[in-house]
Amino acid sequence: MLTVYTGPMFSGKTEALIRAVKRTRYSEQPTQVFVPASDTRNGVGVVRSHAGLDLESLGISAWSVDPADAVSLADRVRPGTKVVAVDEAQFFDASLIENIRTLLRRDLRIYVAGLDCDYRGEPFGPMPQILALADEVFKLTAVCATCNHDQARMTYRRSAETSQVLLGSEDVYAPMCRCCYNNATRKR
Ligand code: ADP
Ligand code: MG
Ligand code: ZN
């Protein structure tokens, strides 16, 4: 079964993933967590939410995977593993999709967290296909940085940098409702 947590930055995707992983300990399901090696905001192989909640403090360390080589991800899943969690899935290349299908065929329980869209509002990396394969999708929202409405679904980039991947937090990105996002991008 595949569950996906998606939405803009600050919507609580990582928190939801951490909660799910935490619960697998109580059900004693061997779990492995994967993150792209390119996401170095909190250090290599670290899953930490913007509020500072992290897996390391729960004694769970994540495997850091080359995002251009997700092929190796399924190979790294140990025979006894029952649950696989992947954070920042949008950074992986398309091979993540086949890996997930392989794991689903092995009856694993999979949790994926990732941005649905980039700062332009374009679907991000392998997320569209992963969302299509999902049994369950949670589209999470954040609080709009401009009007405080709690239905922010877009990620606005404060800088003029135009590459799709630009690591940053509140310094670079702001969650916005569609109305404020439209206003902000029109001004550019
Ligand atoms: P994501 O993985 O979706 O980027 P995280 O799980 O890392 O989100 O962080 C969610 C946390 O971010 C919230 O619980 C809250 O403490 C914090 N946060 C900061 N700014 C906002 C905002 N504008 N809206 C909602 N949560 C915010
Ligand atoms: Mg996150
Ligand atoms: Zn708004």
Image (cartoon, rainbow, N blue to C red):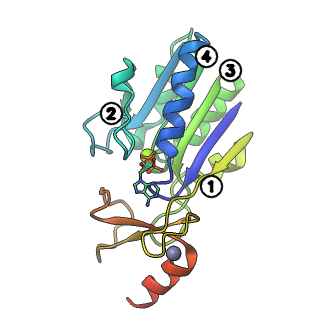
Q: Secondary structure at mark 3?
A: loop
Residue 169 position within the rendered picture, expressed as x and y whole percent measured from the top left? 32, 57
Structural distance between the alpha carbons of marks 1 and 3 = 22 Å
In this view of the protein, which residue sits in the foreground, 172 or 79? 172
Residue 22 in percent (x, y) is at: 51, 23
| Disc 2: which residue | 46
Q: CA distance from mark 2 to mark 4?
A: 21 Å
Specify the quadrant of the image occupied by residue 105.
top right
Q: Nearer the viewer, mark 4 or mark 3?
A: 4
Q: Residue at coordinates 47% horizontally, 64% vertically from top-left?
A: 118
What quarter of the picture does the N terminus occupy? Answer: top right
How many other residues sit within 10 Å of disc 1, few (<14), some (14-19) or many (≥20)?
Answer: some
Label 4–label 3 contact, CB within 8 A: no
Specify few, some or many for label 2: CA neighbours under 10 Å numbering under 14, 14-19, or 20 or more.
many
Q: Which mark is residue 128?
A: 1
Query: In the current view of this chain or complex, which residue is farthest to the front?
Result: 148
Identify residue type, mark 4. Answer: Lys
- Which numbered disc flags the more N-terminal residue, 2 or 4? 2
Check if mark 1's residue and mark 3's residue have beta carbons within 8 Å: no
Q: Are marks 1 and 2 in contact (CB under 8 Å)?
A: no
